[in-house]
Amino acid sequence: MKFGDAVSGLVIVILGIAVATYAMTFPPMPGQPVGPSLFPIVIGGAMAFFGAALMFTAARARTGSWIELDDWVRRPRMVFRFVLLVTDVVLYALVVDALGFFITAFAFLVVLFLAFGVTRKWIAPIAAAVTIGVHYAFYTLLRVPLPWGVLGGIAW
């Protein structure tokens, strides 16, 4: 799927305005002329400016359509896999705190492996290894706490 420059420019303008608007809510630094909001406001303003320039250029060129669909969009199996992936990520975000990282990540991977045709005998070992590897990378190496959820009693 390809988006035309006008659509991309509009999205960039909206994101730039959102960034700058949110940055304006940051508290000022006492005694400092420059606060934590300066750079996000500059970046948001630049995004809005260059997004508008992209929209203007696209409007003058008038080439192509706003959205061009690739071949995969016409194949129901591929659309199902795309929707499943997005749904899986949303569900992960909603239940990871309650169930915990280990259970949620393992289930996330098993569902995707089944949908994408991984050999069934490899699904559980690979999902377990990836889950443990990601947990080790975040929890031990990067010191990012991951939720334990229902496994909180055995947390190390």
Image (spheres, rainbow, N blue to C red):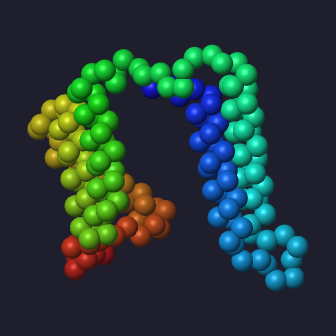
147, 60: nearer the viewer: 60
Q: Position of residue 48 (x, y in %)?
A: 71, 46
Seen in the image, is 98 located left or right of residue 142?
A: left
Q: Which quarter of the rendered picture does the N terminus lie within?
A: top left
Residue 126 visible here? no
Indicate the quadrant where residue 47 lies. top right
- Residue for point 22% across, 61% down: 103
Q: Nearer the viewer, residue 115 or 145?
A: 115
Q: Position of residue 141 (x, y in %)?
A: 46, 62
Tell how many labels.
0
- Can residue 14 be seen here? yes
Q: Which quarter shows the C terminus?
A: bottom left
Identify whether 98 is placed above or below 13. Answer: below
Side of 25 where 155 appears, left or right? left
- Furthest toward the bottom, the residue is 30
Q: Residue at x 68, y 32 (%)?
A: 55
Q: Residue at x 22, y 39 (%)?
A: 113
Quadrant of residue 97 within the rendered picture: bottom left
* As drawn, 48 above or below 101: above
Of 38 and 11, the residue lying toward us: 11
Residue 77 shown left or right of residue 37 in the figure: left
The image shows residue 114 at horizontal and vertical percentages of: 17, 38
- Residue 10 x/y as whole percent: 62, 39
Q: Residue furthest left?
A: 121
Q: Is residue 117 left or right of residue 44?
A: left
Residue at 84 percent of width and 70 percent of height: 34
